[in-house]
Image (cartoon, coloured by chain):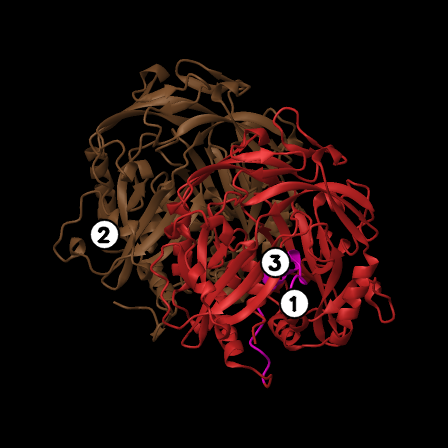
Chain colours: A brown, B red
Amino acid sequence: MERHAATGLLRKPDGTLPHRLARSAATLDGATPNSELADWIAERNAAHRHEVTRIRFDQLRQWHFDPAGGDLRHDSGRFFRVQGLSVRTDYGHVRHWTQPIINQPEIGILGILVREVDGVLHCLMQAKSEPGNVNGVQLSPTVQATKSNYTRVHGGKPVPYLDFFRDPPPEQVLADVLQSEQGSWFYRKRNRNMVVEVTDDPRFDDGAELPEDFRWLTLGQLHALLRVDNLVNMDARTVLSCMPAPAPAPFGEPSTDLADAVARSAQPTAGGLHTTTEVMSWITSRQAAHYVDTTAVPLHEVRGWRRTDAEISHELGLYFSIVAVDITTNGREVASWSQPLVRPFGTGVVALLVKRVEGVLHALVNARVEPGYLDVVELAPTVQCTPENYDHLPPGDHPPFLDVVRASTPEQVLFSTQLSEEGGRFYHAHSEYQIIEVAPDFPDAGLADFRWLTVHQLNELLRHSHYVNVQARSLLACLRGLR
Amino acid sequence: MERHAATGLLRKPDGTLPHRLARSAATLDGATPNSELADWIAERNAAHRHEVTRIRFDQLRQWHFDPAGGDLRHDSGRFFRVQGLSVRTDYGHVRHWTQPIINQPEIGILGILVREVDGVLHCLMQAKSEPGNVNGVQLSPTVQATKSNYTRVHGGKPVPYLDFFRDPPPEQVLADVLQSEQGSWFYRKRNRNMVVEVTDDPRFDDGAELPEDFRWLTLGQLHALLRVDNLVNMDARTVLSCMPAPAPAPFGEPSTDLADAVARSAQPTAGGLHTTTEVMSWITSRQAAHYVDTTAVPLHEVRGWRRTDAEISHELGLYFSIVAVDITTNGREVASWSQPLVRPFGTGVVALLVKRVEGVLHALVNARVEPGYLDVVELAPTVQCTPENYDHLPPGDHPPFLDVVRASTPEQVLFSTQLSEEGGRFYHAHSEYQIIEVAPDFPDAGLADFRWLTVHQLNELLRHSHYVNVQARSLLACLRGLR
């Protein structure tokens, strides 16, 4: 099927795509009926017997502390390592610190395969269990693989459907962009977020059986599932956020004022509180105004942290610790392994304040410095913190707008779900993800690091790397489904 | 004057801007008549008495070699330093090397002030002399200032017109983006490229005298001046490349087939050999396919380079050397100073192959690794090299397409001018900048690191940092003026 308009050699974008995406978003039940989803998840949970046990560092198989600098490394030199980082910055209430951080220089693939089923685009999602998950399986992208994974360093099973993402025909790629991950826990990590459309493939012919871990879901179904605690995993959320913008809902679809405000906000013609040129200039000014100077240091030179047999933790008990786990499962490429994980302290609050200005939704984003970003700042949600980390500080050092989030009334809360961070690296890391609506005249307090952006402006930034951080991407994926 | 369309609080881009830019580009003579330009330049050359003498390193005032690592630093710790860099990459014919490199972490401002004079946008250009220039003054942006400069670390005179760029009213900013500079000579240097429009200011009232070094020029005049050897300096070229795209030439303007092909290529609706989504995916694939691993090393640990009293040079005599100069002038913020400069070996060839596909101009760009880039690759011209650096290598290791450039016939050469690199850091650094047209069916040899892009696609990338390198930006500024 050739959807690209072409006159001779010159090609133009697939004009049907925004409409096909809008139709998928408006399709609330799909090829995998909603009525069967709970049973499928329960079944996959049972099938993926999965035991995770905290162990001592000296019980880790194939991992060791480097004798020279104390870094925690895999014997192969691959996967990732835990090292130290020294940070100096002008941003925030602490200007200099050292910390452990995960260094994973390889670029992995997070890919969602999409396909029209009965004329509606569906996403091929995988029920996948990760050692750090608070529950069992979560919905992950079709492919979620580090380079060590898919080049099979550990000699596991091949990654299903990887071939669709390794060297795809250019005209079938709907999105393909490197995006950062948690800049407080990862040093310059990025993954390749991909959406690839498949038309014909014998694996998807009528009558061909789909592997038990995989199901086709519409965008409308995924928007509903994003409201279920700890169900759609971080990797799925970030890829969904990079999906191209849909057209306004098809004519005649039932709508609400809120859905209309979101749809208008996604239209380039609607305008906004700031023009896109002004937004770009603001981002440039923040990159230029702040500095962050990071230097790799050996893990044993990190100060204010202590290492026991089974944990590297901050002396105040705050932030996060490094732990070790042993995993036995029948559902992954390898049946048993052990690895380190980052275990955050407390439950995070990740909240986006939104307001409707003349019927156009705006989101308040924060140009935020994190030491692991490639550039200086990325755009974060309005609030992104673990409140307990600030309890020992004077109120003036508490994160801006946290009080607004905490004082919000039920009718202000457009979205509130507990969502998990990546269970392959983080142990029981989850945050309350919230979208809170404030009055149209709510001020941004004149804070230089905050601006009200439209959904269209954020969508455009998401076509590029290093603008929108992983927490904001998660909330954008959720925001698009607001009804 | 309020040019932004606004309905209440919501604002939209200035729809008149592309037309005003097109009009400026079509205006070939302006407020400063062409007939007076040569005299003005000659006069400024005479006024800026400027003596540059090569000196020994130990004659440098306020600069010293760090006793510990041998880095060449300013006594204040500001400005820049020359350090060592160890590089490992999979790109090119040498996979591992060490080299000296300039580390200048401060973000400077390169700003062009624009203003309508008699209804036509003009750029305020400065005649500025730099110690490394092969000639005297060149045309530079209104403001060209490092942070050390404009915060007056060296106690010089204030930078004229700086106030327009320090905290401009958002709606007067036409462009504002961080862009990289030479990644072989600078480590992660970037400058803030700004275009700011001024409407009313007493300094520009009728009858107010403009300082002798400053003149208002139209885009059409600048396009013509770009064809003069070593006249429009690198900083002016990079800011001009970041100027927003003009509308197609006003109706009734005389045009040529070539100008039409450039104008069509700048239109988003014209289509191209690849869609923008495909171009973005190609760039992502190049960022992910290549790696470059750089580590700062002390300058005295750089191997294959030797230091004499007056020069740090490569043992083969290739690439570049570090030299020291003493400068006496009456035309700068300070009358006399000394500093190190990078002195490249040979004359560079910087060439863009272009072809017309169904009447739309396409440019062949190269996803190129340079060790000083913040990310892995940036888009470079088709050819960017100093041919002599390759003479000692087998023909298979010569840069792709250099033979095509060298074999080009006069009718293929759409543009050919010797242009200088930044004379504040580089000593007599200049390259032959060329735009060479090839046949519509000219293949790209299937090379994974090369793609044919339209001007519109390049213009869109230029709104963001770290996509288009400084040499390609120079050629784009020249390409827009092709008639």
Residue under label 1? B228
Q: Secondary structure at mark 2?
A: loop
* Mark 2 residue type: Thr
Q: Chain of mark 3?
A: B
Work out which quarter of the rendered image holds the C terminus of chain A and state it: bottom left
On screen, residue B483 above or below A134: below
Q: In the image, which disc is placed on residue B238?
A: 3
Residue range highlighted in magenta: B226-251
Q: Is residue B268 magenta?
A: no
Q: Mark 3 or 1 closer to N-term?
A: 1
Cα separation between marks 2 and 1: 67 Å
- Report the chain holding disc 1: B
Chain label for disc 2: A
Q: Quadrant of residue A126?
A: top left
Mark 2, residue position: A32
Say if labels 3 and 1 share a chain.
Answer: yes
Q: Quadrant of residue B21?
A: bottom right
